Amino acid sequence: MTLSTGARDPLLLALTACLALVLLLLPRPAAAAAFNGQFYRGEGDVEYLQLLDVSRRLFAPDPEFQNIAMLYTPAWDGFVEGPTWGAWWIQNSYGPTYCALPFFEEPYVTFLQNAQDLWFQQMGDGKRVFKWKDNEWLVPDGQLCDAAAPDWVVPKQGDGRVDIHDWGMEFTAAGVVMQAELLLIGRDAKAIEHYLPLLERCANFIETRRDPKNNLFLAGAAGNLLAPSYAGWKKPDGTYDKAYLAGLSITYIAGLDRLIELERLAGRSDKANWYTERRDLARKGLPLLTTDEGYFLKYLDPDGTKHGVYGAKEHGYFEAVCNHDALCFRVADDAQAERIYAKLASIPGLRRHDLIITNEPSLDDMYEPDTGWLWKHGTWVNGGHWTTCEARMVMAYYRLGKYEDARRSMKKLLTFARDFRLDNPLVDFGNAVYQPKEPINLCYDSFGGPAAMVRGLFEYLYRADGLTLLPHVPPGVTRLEQNFPLRFGAKRLYLATVGSGAITGVLLNGKRWKSFDAKSVFLPYDRTPAEAAVQILLGGAKPGPFTPAKATPALPPPPGAEALPADLFPVIVPNQLPLRLGADSNGENRFLGDLAQPVVFSRALTADEVGALAESGLGGLSKDPALVGAWTLGDQQAELFPNPVDADLSAKAVGHVEVVDGPKGKAVRLSGEGYLEIANAPKVSLTHACTMAAWICPKVLPPGGARIIDKTQVGTSNGYLLDTCPSNSLRLIVERGSLGHAANLVPDQWAHVAATVAADGTEALYLNGKAVATQQRTTSQEVESLAARVAKLRAFHQRLEEAGLGDSYEAAHARLAVQCLSTAHARLKLLAEGKLTRLPEASQYAADKSYFSTAAKLCDGLERLLKSYEDSADARKQRVWELWEG
């Protein structure tokens, strides 16, 4: 039966009305959750967006988290590995530097270059001599180093059996990668011209280890990146020789990829072709280092023995470092990358705590047994965790779309960040800090994971002709905006994505952009605007509004005039170090001469009491309840010098110490070969006041002086210290401040020296019972002058902007110092309002102080730099100096 049109219409209307009613009653899909952070904003997976935002926050002054500015040192106007690591390492900086370079702006770029210059300015030239104990070696031309500081460089791995170590082969290759990447991103022709010859020397040095028969590279013990976990080929006679190291091939190929692009950028196609030939030959050797399952061995002995075939009877471990590096730097193609990851993911022990370790199970081919704490599995280079490696692992996660792995990694790292424990390595397979006795921890390595969280989103493949973006955005994030610029030569990019899936469209400054495919976007340098807002459309999504939220160059307002809390900076801050007589916390700065009658009190003696102590000895003070120690140097028992006040605080001789006659009894003669040490205990961990005194008969002491009584961490003001810096002077250091006096101590003549610190901040130095210097500080010496110094930087910054130099390094450095002090005050305000979780007492103090110390160090460095401009013949530097002087 056929219904007429007229009969159908009422039925259709009824059905339509019913359907509309049903649709109205159905639950509507919830709008995507939104996130609006400091550096990221978007919709969808809010937790992931928060992790991204925190990751980026670690690279700017932040009141809640440690940040990378805290690793600045004025010693070379650059980054340092950490407060307890006074140099710049290649291995430790590799992951963080590579991953942070695209978003590093000034002054961080200069900080980084100044740090890396420590390597290149002291690289091997075939003439430089490296001395180690009784050994001397000529450093080959082009060899970089393990670590360097001004006038100090270690071209071999400096831990372990250095006498059998090879040169740092993979250190050199990784140094090439970092410096070449820095130059590719910056595109500074003058800098490229300067560094290309140095990088060529590095590459030529690595080429001396190429075996032309198989295009593999030979390296001896500790020639790997995470040295000294690699011993090389153990020959039948028990000695060690060179083997074919997979990491060296992989890292060198990554370096050659970048050298090729740099040479093209410099217009030198002949050199680019030369490096291309080297790279292609190196790639031909890789199959010999590849297992049947597709992952890389750790190394191959010349006799064919394979190290790092997981599950094999011998050397049956999986080496994570060379494998995640092959993924990160795209040495492995996509198919091999998937196979490597599949194997890695099948070994649970590699990520017991969501962070990658170096190897699983324990290495059986080190030159040391894996029985001691440092060498056992899970502690150091044998299965410990290094966040410099995590950076490259996270890059691999992003490349392969393993976003949940990246999420778990960053969440684990945040457990350390929240406690101000950004330490490296992490022991217990990545579950605990290496230096738990420090009140807080900070290492450059630790910024690797957060940096990779940021770089991994778009990967950023820099080339001579442009930049390739490879979006790796978690599918749960349906809108993403980066509120900070990416560097591309002199140009700046602001990136955003909408949707999820393959790339289906691109807008550049609101206009359609055609240079893309389903996986990548290409930006030719000559066609990219100076400032480009790039919105990438995924999975057919429609474009939305995208106006980058750019950071303002304006300085934050000055902190309020309210006084800092009176207890913010104690007079003395305790530590876990031993008390030493005649040496510093590193066992250095040793006293040369004789030392007698050392005493320590937990209160400040009066001037009369110090006079009596110098004249007559302890006398009635021997019964003073504040007396901590009065070591008897004539009653040595074995290696111990007794302390009648407390038998548990005897002084132990470390090294060679000779007992001789002193002015009033026995003394110890310190010839630079030994010192005395008292174990840490509550009684020597003073907090409110102290007195240190001793008779000394010094020799002519070096410019840095020598320690007399020391319980201070080198480079800090915690604990308490009495020494002779500079030379034969007197100096007192405690947290509240330092006090010095040009004592002109006469060599080979006895003198009584003393220092007192009272609870009200009054400090005094005494020579032969007489006060020679006094002062009172109501707050930290460092903080006391900081407000005025930063105020001067504010005025200097304004003059730079007015002179058209607001984009200069000096202006950026000044801005950072101002921001750091402002952030320090913001932190105190948040703490007072209960908006930040407090740390344990010792950690809380150290954390709070680190903010002020960072601002002070930035002031120190910039002031020192500007002073060097005073007599410069460079017109620009002269102009900057004039602006500084006002």
Image (cartoon, rainbow, N blue to C red):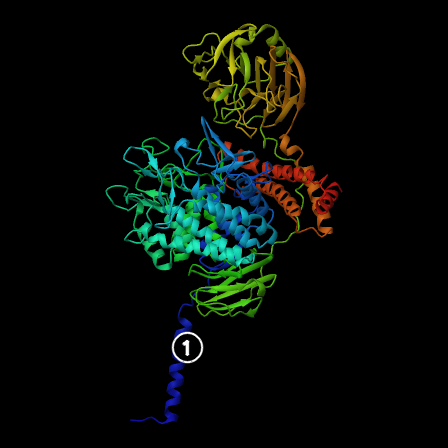
Q: Nearer the viewer, residue 265 or 657?
A: 265
User: Of the residues shown, which amino acid type is indicated by label 1?
Assistant: Ala
Q: Nearer the viewer, residue 400 or 125?
A: 125
Q: Nearer the viewer, residue 877 or 203?
A: 203
- Quadrant housing the N terminus: bottom left
Image coordinates of residue 821 in percent, x first then y, are 62, 41
Image coordinates of residue 487 in percent, x first then y, are 56, 55
Image coordinates of residue 456 in percent, x first then y, are 46, 54
- Tally the marks: 1
Which element is circle 1 on?
helix
Decide if residue 15 is on the left or right side of residue 615: left
Q: Within the image, what quadrant is residue 721 found in? A: top right
Taking 372 as reference, is 647 above or below it? above
Residue at 47% x, 19% y: name it.
677
Say if residue 408 shows up in the picture.
no
Image coordinates of residue 399 in percent, x first then y, are 41, 57
Which residue is outermost to the left?
Answer: 313
Which residue is outermost to the front?
Answer: 212
- Quadrant housing the C terminus: top right
Name the residue that disc number 1 marks: 20
Q: Nearer the viewer, residue 488 or 100?
A: 488
Residue at 51% x, 70% y: name it.
514
Taking 607 as reference, is 557 above or below it? below
Q: Residues within 10 Å of mark 1 (few under 14, many from 20)?
A: few
Q: Within the image, what quadrant is residue 785 found in? A: top right
Say if residue 103 shows up in the picture.
yes
Taking 766 as reference, is 14 above or below it? below
